[in-house]
Amino acid sequence: MEEKIKKVLDEQVSPLLESHFGGVQLAKFENGVLYVRLTGACSSCPSAQYTIEDVVKTIVLKEVPEVKDVVLDTSVSDELLDMARKLLKKEK
C-alpha cells in the first residue's frame, strides 16, 4: 500500500509542489490515515494546511481509495534534531 501511495505522491503531488520549491514525503500510513510531511518551502508555508486539504488530500483520495484521510505531520524530523544538536555543540 505504501508503495502505491508513494507513487501517487511522487508522480502527481510532488510536481505541483516543486513549482513552489517544496515537496511531500510519506511519514506513515495507519488505519486508513495517511500522514505526510511537507518539505522545502512548503514546510514553513503559512498555507501548509490548505496545501494538504486542497492538493495532497484531493489527489490521494481520488487515486488511492484505501486512504480515508490525509493529515499533515508537523513533528520534528530526526535529521533536524541531529542538526540542532550539532549546532548547539558547535560541531561541523
Image: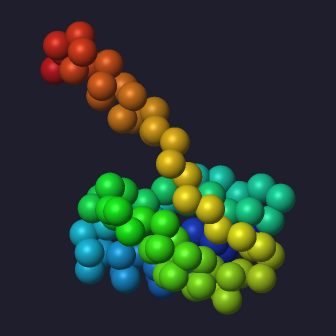
Asked if residue 30 lies left or right of residue 82, the reply is right
Above or below residue 64? Residue 21 is above
Vertically, is 47 above or below 88? Answer: below
Question: Where's residue 41, x and y in %?
Answer: 27, 62
User: Residue 18: x percent and y percent?
Assistant: 30, 75
Q: Residue at x 19, y 15 (%)?
A: 91
| Coloring scheme used | rainbow
Q: Quadrant of residue 77?
A: top left
Q: Residue at coordinates 68% horizontally, 82% vertically from top-left?
A: 61
Residue 49 is situated, as x and y percent measured from the top left of the image, at 49, 66
Drawn side of residue 12 relative to residue 84, left or right = right
2 or 61: which is nearer to us? 61
Which residue of the protein is positioned furthest toward the front in this rendering? 46
The number of discs equals: 0
Q: Quadrant of the N terminus?
A: bottom right
Residue positioned 32% across, 62% down in the render: 45
